[in-house]
Image (cartoon, helix red, strand yellow):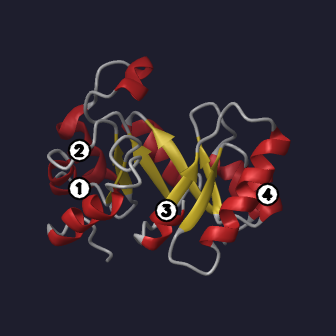
Amino acid sequence: MRVAVESRITLVQLREKNLSPRSLYRLTAEALTITRGTETRLLVNDRADIARACGADGVHLTTGSLEASVVRRAFGDDFLIGVSAHTLLEAMAARDGGANFATFSPIFVTPSKRSYGAPIGIEQLNEAAHALAPFPLVALGGITTESAPQAIKAGARGIAAIRLFNDAEQLPETLRFFRHNLILKNE
């Protein structure tokens, strides 16, 4: 987490699906001691209640979570809401429900998204990004330094990845690559 903050990652999601609520609360509180007062915003996967109780920036909702509209009504406009979407209709529902953004996945082949079937590909990302603009879609699934430029060119407003950003030693260099190649437009 410290390397992500020092590297100026804009958003980190705590994606600990198997922790008990108590353990997730403790982990979130600990992560917030690192992110508070920095450019890095912290989202908690699926647990808006824990995110709010700890003072995290928001929540990332899965396809099995509460709808974004329910979370928006309960937690207000200041609470950042991301939503996982695998189809244009899911992304539209996220937008219409008051989400701030949706991850759109899987764009490319990736082990963590095999359960969602074949990758949706660049063409569907392009169609969805243009249909929903200016609502931001974040490309997810099989994102690499080689594939990220394709996703941005197709209309993604950002990229998200697990494997690409998981190596703390390589993270600064990976981000330098993206910043140099204008992938991270908001830097």
Q: Check the picture and name the quadrant holding the C terminus.
A: bottom left
Q: For the view shown, which residue lies furthest in the front direction?
A: 169
* Earlier residue among tags 1 and 3: 3
* Earlier residue among tags 3 and 4: 3
Instruction: Find disc 1 in the rendering and name its residue.
Output: 155
Instruction: Find disc 2 in the rendering and name its residue.
Output: 144
> Alpha carbon of mark 3 to alpha carbon of mark 4: how far?
22 Å
| 40 in relation to 132, above or below | below
Instruction: Find disc 4 in the rendering and name its residue.
Output: 74
Q: Which secondary structure lies at badge 4?
A: helix
| 95 in relation to 42, above or below | above
Viewer-side label of 3, 4 = 3
Question: What residue sits 64% from the left and 39% below the top?
Answer: 16
Q: For the view shown, which residue lies furthest in the bottom direction?
A: 37
Mark 1 near mark 3, Cβ–Cβ under 8 Å?
no
Q: Which secondary structure lies at badge 2?
A: loop
| Mark 2, other Cα within 10 Å: few <14 / some 14–19 / many ≥20 | some
Instruction: Find disc 3 in the rendering and name its residue.
Output: 11
| 2 in relation to 127, above or below | below
**Kind of residue sitting beneath label 1:** Gly
